[in-house]
Image (cartoon, rainbow, N blue to C red):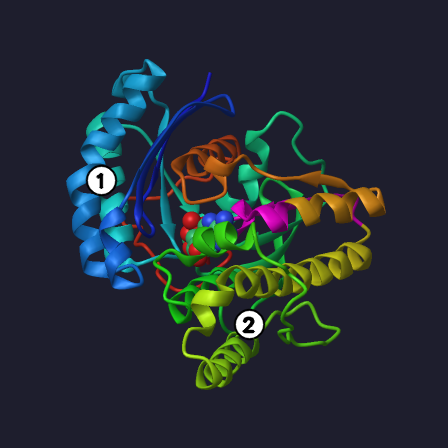
Amino acid sequence: MVRILGIESSCDETSAAVCVEGRLLSNVVSAQVQHSGFGGVVPELASRLHQQHIVRVVQAALEQAGLRPADLDAVAFTRGPGLMGSLLVGTCFAKAFALGLGKPLIAVNHLQAHVLANFLHEAPPQFPFLCLTVSGGHTQLVLARGYRELELVGETKDDAAGEAFDKAAKLLGLGYPGGPLIDKAAQSGDANRFAFSAPRDASLEFSFSGLKTSLLYFLQAEMKKDAAFITKNLNDICASYQARIVTYLLEKLEQAAMQFGVRDLAIAGGVSANRELRSRFQQLCARRNWRAHVPAFEYCTDNAGMIALTGYYQFLAGEFCGHDVTPFSRDRFLED
Ligand code: KG4
Ligand code: ZN
């Protein structure tokens, strides 16, 4: 029985989970609500809050799993990408904990873990499968041929899908994170009311900066005519803008699935919690006769469950790291 402790601290969630033989026994997530008034995550604040919470979160994960630290076989942690100050807290904690216990250490790539979160549900994907990872920092198309054979086949050139939501929410005067707020407002809005433009090209690369700018110019023009335009039309703006993002994401996903001839498709990352994306993804797969895989809500946004599970696969593959390992903040899908 392989028992792995997973630790996640890449952004604004302090999380710890215990995975035994590929199944989660606990997944404790402490989300930092203190950033909401700032319109984004404040890195220094995030790092300090991780420091305050990490011991309690790890203790709770072990207690819920009914395990003692000595029962663990390895400690897995998020090495990157993410905020450096935040990553350092999880990395230092994991190193010290593993060293104290005399257990091996496993460095996990956060983006690979988002893809593998699809193995946390009952009917997991069959290889090869294609995953659309959409989070606050990333938009990626990943072709998975095995647990440790993940290939990046497309990604964004500028903003991530989550940023397209978060920046729009800021323009609309909503709070942070913007994705869930736009999702909620869009529920009672008309998605066909306003048109926003997204790039049209045949590549598997994404670009969201034009879409965000088209919203900005649209709002500026309408506000000149009526200063209360946003308040009066909030739900329709959110529904139309959200629908444009979802259409754009699914067009590329469909194109990639045809290109690689896969029959299993998955979505992952914080934006995969979006109701419109989840339902239209299911519809697309049903129409094409593809198998659709969608992680449970708690495994879409940042969580240590996916880190512990990826750690488990790395344990089986003998992929451990030394205590000289350092976190990386920038976008790297595969470690060197
Ligand atoms: O994966 P995640 O928790 O953190 C990163 O690794 O970035 O993703 C956070 C992102 C934020 O941009 C947030 O606005 C977005 O996921 N998000 C959503 C929804 N829930 C979270 N976007 C759209 N609809 C949602 N329901
Ligand atoms: Zn994430």
Q: CA distance from mark 2 to mark 1?
A: 36 Å
Q: Which residue is mark 1?
A: 93
Report which residue position mark 2 lands on: 208
Crowd rating for badge 1 (residues with CA inside 10 Å; few <14, some 14–19, many 20+): some
Towards the viewer: 2 or 267: 267
| Residue that extends furthest to the top in the rendered view of this protein | 66
- Would residue 164 be visible to someone looking at this image? no
Please give the range of residues in magenta: 262-278
Residue at point 41% right, 71% down? 171
Kindly identify the residue that appears in the image at 66 percent across and 65 percent down.
248
Q: How many marks?
A: 2
Percent across and percent down for residue 155 are: 58, 65
Q: Is mark 1 within 8 Å of ligand 2?
A: no
Q: Quadrant of residue 43?
A: bottom left
Q: Of the residues shown, which amino acid type is indicated by label 1?
A: Phe
Q: Is residue 38 magenta?
A: no
Quick one: label 2, few (<14), some, or many (20+) residues within 10 Å?
many
Amino acid, disc 2 = Phe
Residue 184 versus residue 7 in the image, above or below: below
Q: Quadrant of residue 85?
A: bottom left
Q: Check whether the beta carbons of the residues at disc 2 and disc 1 lie within 8 A of each other.
A: no
Residue shown at 55% from the left, 72% from the top:
208
